[in-house]
Amino acid sequence: MSHAPTGVMERPTPASPSPKSSLGSRSLPRLAPLGFAAVSIALGVGLSLAAGWESRIQWGMISALLFLAISYVATTVVENQRQAKDRLATSVMWVCFLIAVVPLASLLWTTIVRGAERLDGYFLTHSMAGVLGSEASGGVYHALIGTLEQVGIATVISAPLGLLTAVYLVEYGKGSLAKAVTFFVDVMTGIPSIVAGLFILSIMLIANLEPSGLMGALALTILMIPVVVRSTEEMLKLVPNELREASLALGIPKWRTILKVVLPTAIGGITTGVMLAIARIAGETAPIILLVFGSQLINTNPFEGAQSSLPFYIYEQYKIGEAASYDRAWAAALVLIAFVMILNLVARGIARWKAPKTGR
Amino acid sequence: MASTTPIDTPPAPPVPRPSPRSTGRMGDKIFLGLSRGSGILLLVIMASIAVFLTYRSVLAISKDEGNFLTTFDWNPAGDPPVFGIAVLLFGTVVSSIIAMVIAVPIAVGIALFISHYAPRKLAAPIAYVVDLLAAVPSIVYGIWGALVLVPYLEGLNLWLDQFFGWTYIFEKTEVGVARSLFTVGILLAIMILPIVTSVSREVFLQVPKMNEEAALALGATRWEVIRLSVLPFGRSGIISASMLGLGRALGETMAVATVLSPNFLISLHLLNPGGGTFAQNIAAKFGEADAFGRDALIASGLVLFVLTLLVNGAARLIIARRKEYSGANA
């Protein structure tokens, strides 16, 4: 451990023009962190191998800790303690970032690799009718239909409601009602999806309703409205006041101003918000378990009878616990992630393309 | 109001509101009615969630032969029906605390990394990717956690047991796969990282440039700039971001339901498989529950609802105290 810093220290470093390290005080070369990283990884792997530890996670953690220690000591010796702390902080930030990247990259990688094994045209166009859990057959068609219908119904209900609420908050909202709505919209964003499911379930129990796609969609609506309200609100606030004033000055009533001037200006951002909200609810599983029940068959009627949905299908296949069903679960997960990601990318694309021109 | 913008206080001269009667046009009335109506509808929904859940819960709890708060069992179908939330409350709180302890420092680190450390060209794409990751559905985290993370953590578990077994909480007394509250905590930490990161990043980007430049002008290193000007400014933002993350972690269903192998025991040996959370218990027990069993599950859901309501409400109040910050578009 000690040979690394001394090796770096002996090298004179006049060539690194760092504006902050001034007036002849010694400083480490710019590429020193890379050297520390190499040394600490080598040491970490060596130590772990020597101790016989198996987990790669441990290797990474030990290397990361060594890296922090080495760069701190080296900088203290060569420069001073303040610089050492600065370098330590920088390293910690980098390590944080890397720590976070590893699991997230692994998640995406696994889903893509495992999902691609099973994903093909057959998988997308067939249901699970008559397929045993252990059979390497069947598909996701019925779940796709279920997801699209439930999400569609939820969007049809919550987009107008959310939009109107946002318009109320931004254009009309004053006083205690607006304050209460704002606060509860915020709180509503935090409602766990399973609680939304239980709420609809309690209504179903009271009114003696049967599980159906519609019930699931209603629970999704509760989850979706606050997201739409928040994003629309932010977008409406970006619309410059001059536009409203110009329209009102021409004697146009407020409602027409809102419909013809304010909303069209913000339409890009509003669309983005709605699409992001769709992407969020498309992955909700818990309400579907409680309210739609799941089915192996194609049911195109969301108002009657059990349906399936993509996230529910993944859960169902995971619970079967056979190799073939795991394959199906990964493939469906890939379909779901692709759906959500495409929605996200398109939404953000629209946001950039149609960004409201704020006053300069 | 979470934020005050020019729109909230309409500029006096241009917006003519000479008398309320001049807005008496039909269109305006209808439009105002519609938009106010949907605002009120939201309040009604929130209220009815509370009312309906409470109503069904009362039905269930009144027939509970055990103590709802302290019973270590969930058997509403039994004779007499006995069920209690002690284990679920413990599991929910413990797994969320583990998630917070892991996720918040790392998330703040990433947020600082994006806002102050990353090379300019990298910062925007990284922020973008973090936002995308917030959109990964929880069930995908769930199967990834169960099929990839759990096998990976076995080594870490053994290591923790070997070197930190003396702390009691890291003592692994049962042999078995790592389907424990600890693993759930790690998975939840990974899941709430993106949201905590993006909210804290928003706050860090709002730190007045003047403050940072003043610190730099006094010769502060980058870390000192962060410690002296960024972190004090962003503290309430970090707190509320963590509480938003905590709200997510408390109510997370699928990731816990797939990873945990539940039982109805409270054990501080966090590495042992077992325990349970509210949401996981509802998802797991719902299939076999009869009508009364569902009411019992609704009762446990009510507790979860109140818990998340408190946490989220507190987070929002902290945000609202700082009027200039409106980063709640999670």
Image: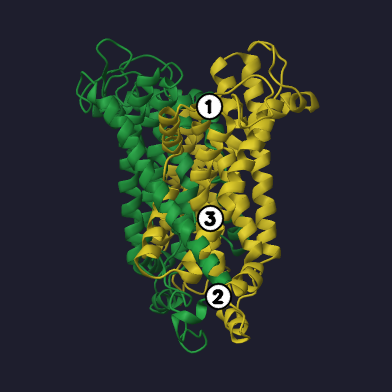
Judged left or right of residue B327, residue B53 is left
Q: CA distance from mark 1 to mark 3?
A: 26 Å
Which chain: green? B
Disc 1 versus disc 3: nearer the observer? 1
Q: Which residue is mark 2?
A: B25
Chain A shade in the render: yellow
Between the residue at mark 3 and the residue at mark 2, the CA separation in whole angstroms equals: 24 Å
Viewer-nearest of labels 3 and 2?
A: 2
* Residue under the image location 40 percent in, 38 percent down: B251
Please name the residue that numbered disc 3 is placed on.
A162
Residue in view at x 42 percent, y 75 percent: B216
Tell me the SS state at disc 1. loop
Identify the subunit bearing mark 3. Answer: A
Q: Residue at x 40, y 26 (%)?
A: B282
Quarter location, residue B3:
bottom left
In contact (CB < 8 Å): disc 3 and disc 2? no
Residues at marks 2 and 1, CA–CA distance in whole angstroms: 44 Å
